[in-house]
Amino acid sequence: MNKPDHPAEASRLAHEAELAEQAQNVEPSAVPPAPEPMGHVHRKKESWLEVVKTIVYALLIAGVIRSFLFQPFNIPSGSMEGTLLIGDYLFVSKSTYGFSRYSFPFGVIPFSGRFAVMSEPQRGDIVVFKFPPDNSTDYIKRLIGLPGDRIQMKEGVLYINDAAVPKMKVDDYVEKIGEETRNVPRYRETLPNSVSYDVLDRDPEGNLDNTQVFVVPEGHYFMMGDNRDNSADSRVDVGYVPFENFVGKAQIIFFSTDGSARIWEVWKWPWAIRYDRLGHFVE
């Protein structure tokens, strides 16, 4: 190769050769990444926006279903035992009795009365309602008395408008308490509108077997638990329930567990589920 004739040219070539040698020795990771195209960044933002919008839409749809169609509830106590068990999870129809402020979460929409009533409450309906003394706690009982009815218990027999409700012994309800079992007398009552259901009579001489006469006020209803001697209902704490406090009508049990498996005991779940109660319509 010919040598450069001019010293400056020689210096330039030497500098270029040195830079080329340095470039060959640079680690690949030391090379700064090429900047992302602006279109790629924009697509990332759009992707996150789509995720956020999907979540918002899902929450809105769930809110609409919960407020206007069906709401899930679980049974925490034994006041409806024999019909509903602790650990039952059921759907409640929100549209059956129309809508009030308590049809919405936390009663956030302040209005009085009901609208869009599809059907009037009937004797024998199993109703979820807000506990009148605080208007916030959910209770579930059977509707026994309509506005204007006279309700009384005499020696364990239910009277509606001074007429005894037929009560027939059917069998013993067998309940398990720990390792022991207990038999509780079970009876079938038939209301004046021919609705029949089972009730438990734990204490034939209990305090709730004889009551005063309750006259149900206009716009209110009288509620009782099917577990008659173990129910806080209109005979004692609940009192008369305003129609406005109705949340919905119990319809179907979609899940049920006997409580023998804790949430973290995954291996016990298959044996804790009451499979025979799944899909069971509430009557």
Image (cartoon, helix red, strand yellow):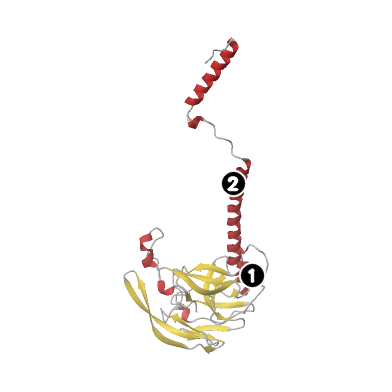
Q: Amino acid at mark 1?
A: Ser
Q: Which residue is drawn at the image coordinates 52% and 75% (left, top)?
A: 251
| CA neighbours of label 1 inside 10 A, class few (<14), some (14 to 19), many (20+) | many
Q: Amino acid at mark 2?
A: Lys
Residue 104, given in percent of the width and then of the height, sits at 61, 65
Badge 2 element: helix
Identify the residue under disc 2.
44
Residue 276, given in percent of the width and then of the height, sits at 41, 74
Badge 1 element: loop
Q: Which residue is drawn at the image coordinates 56% and 78% (left, top)?
A: 222
Q: Nearer the viewer, residue 193 or 208?
A: 193
Residue 189 visible = yes
State yes or no: discs 2 and 1 in contact (Cβ < 8 Å).
no
Q: Which mark is residue 100?
A: 1
Q: Is residue 279 above or below residue 26?
A: below
Residue 85: quarter of image? bottom left
Q: Nearer the viewer, residue 241 or 122?
A: 122
* Labels 2 and 1: the sequence-earlier one: 2
Q: Which residue is drawn at the image coordinates 60% and 53% (left, top)?
A: 50
| CA neighbours of label 2 inside 10 A, class few (<14), some (14 to 19), many (20+) | few
Q: Which mark is residue 247?
A: none
Q: Nearer the viewer, residue 229 or 282?
A: 282
Residue 80, given in percent of the width and then of the height, sits at 47, 75
